[in-house]
Image (spheres, helix red, strand yellow):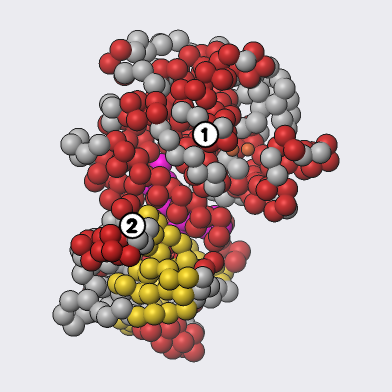
Amino acid sequence: LALKILLCDPDEEWLATASKFLSDQLYQVKSVYNGKDAQLALYNDSYFAVILNIDLTNHSGLQVLKFIKTNYTNQNVVMVVNKDQEDNRESLIKMGAKDLIAKPFELSELCQTLEGHQSLGDLVNNLPKKEGGSSAEEEVSGEDANFTKIPIGEFFSSKAVLFDIYVRLSSGRYIKILHAGDAFDRSRVEKYKNEKGVEYLHFHNKDRRKFVQFNNFLAKKLISNKALPSEQKVSVLKNTTEKYLEEVFTVGMKPQVIEQGKQVCENVYRLIEKDDSLFKLLKSYQEFDPSAYSHAFLVTMFSSCIIKQFEWQSKSTIETTALACMFHDIGKMSLPKELLEKKVDDMNAEELEEYKKHPELGLEMVEGNRMINNSVKQIILQHHESFDGTGFPFGKKGANILTLANIVSMADRFVHIMVEEEVAPIVALKKILTQKEEASRFNSMIVANFINVFVDPAKIDKDKSMPSNSRIVNNKAS
Ligand SMILES: [Fe+2]
Ligand SMILES: [Fe+2]
């Protein structure tokens, strides 16, 4: 069964084009030109989503929105607005819109917006129907840059696969082993591994968001299962976070992408709250992948674990910091690639100056984004400040640095040592503790709680006092 969409727009020509486009994407479309017909259509049928132009007449777009809010509370509504009305996002969302899209936009953007609101059930229902079993393998060619990979053993699926899955033969050559809608057969996939030595499954970058969505859902389920080992939970969370960050770094900070990030952070919080044996895994965690995505994931994990040790920790401090950690180095996107390939120690004075701009560049990228709160923005800006004043960009000192930013800074430094020197977490931490110029960069309370990350939580006496710099978060505009 295809998902039904109600398109409401006064422009007949646009309606015809959009209707054709969405039908090609397997949606079932009904179009109306005015508000009265929109309400009638809603009365007669139910829709997965309503695309509602604010400029509708004969019952204005806003009147229809009000009608929907009163009568169909959970209806997905994507409001089509003009550029200058984008600022009204919050009030339109309060009035019942799920999302906004500003004119002019490409129809593919509209599709992305719709997909961003699909639940897993919707996704599965929207799959093209298969006539019995799975389809035959098919060789295709495609640019490697358009594919993303995942270790076979770490790939999970719903009963029917949500998107096409490939095995890579050689550069640019792939076999499609499963088509969207095929029944997922673990043994068939394992065969590739056991008989042909295939290590990775690949999927198209355009399906990355579906991957993240499914894995977020899966992570939520796995984390609440007490019988499962921490390794498996961390591994699902790691893959979800990394693919999520790949998506952010490719498509940018779109609202529906940020929304997914918040779900990732909720899962980070759940894992840390619920898994009491996580400390054992973290002690000896050995994953030395130098990629920026893996780096961000590890910083997220360890920062969240440090915060958990403080008495003042809460769901919102952990989720806020987790989001900041995922984006902390986003400013590096604006730096030249050659610079990023260099180690900081190998940079000359000029390059170092350039590199030190990344916290401010990061802030610039998220500054206008209302879905990202000010604490997140401040952490991004301050994640290289040091307690002793030796950091950058401002050389802030002690209590002038947000505690959460100093936590992220310590986790960042720690992950850096751990991955670069390929040492166990405990060894990396010892390195920081035994070198005065390293240790003095962090609030001693944070250092003490970092040590607690590796101690059995049953044996920790929670420190009830605030760190000496007691400004935990700062929500005032800076
Ligand atoms: Fe950084
Ligand atoms: Fe970093």
Residue occupying the far right of the picture: 350
For label 2, the crowd category at 10 Å Cα-Cα, with few meaning under 14, some 14 to 19 and many 20 or more, is some
Instruction: Let me know if residue 425 appears in the view.
Output: yes
x and y percentages locating residue 142 in the rendered image: 49, 76
Q: Earlier in the sequence, mark 1 or mark 2?
A: 2
Q: Residue at x 52, y 25 (%)?
A: 428
Q: Identify the mark at residue 365; answer none if there is no mark.
A: none
Q: Is mark 1 within 8 Å of ligand 2?
A: no
Residue occupying the far left of the picture: 132
Q: Residue at x 72, y 30 (%)?
A: 392
Secondary structure mainly formed by the magenta segment: helix
x and y percentages locating residue 418 in the rendered image: 52, 31
Q: Quadrant of the C terminus?
A: top right
Residue 366 vs residue 146, the one in the foreground: 146
Helix, strand or loop at disc 1?
A: loop
Q: Identify the mark at residue 422; answer none if there is no mark.
A: 1
Which residue is denoted by mark 2 in the rendering? 152
For label 1, the crowd category at 10 Å Cα-Cα, with few meaning under 14, some 14 to 19 and many 20 or more, is some
Residue 116 vs residue 93, the one in the foreground: 116
Residue 95 vs residue 364, the one in the foreground: 364
The answer to whether residue 443 is above or below residue 474 is above
Helix, strand or loop at disc 2?
A: helix
Inter-mark Cα distance, 1 to 2: 24 Å
Instruction: Let me know if residue 184 appears in the view.
Output: no
Magenta range: 252-265
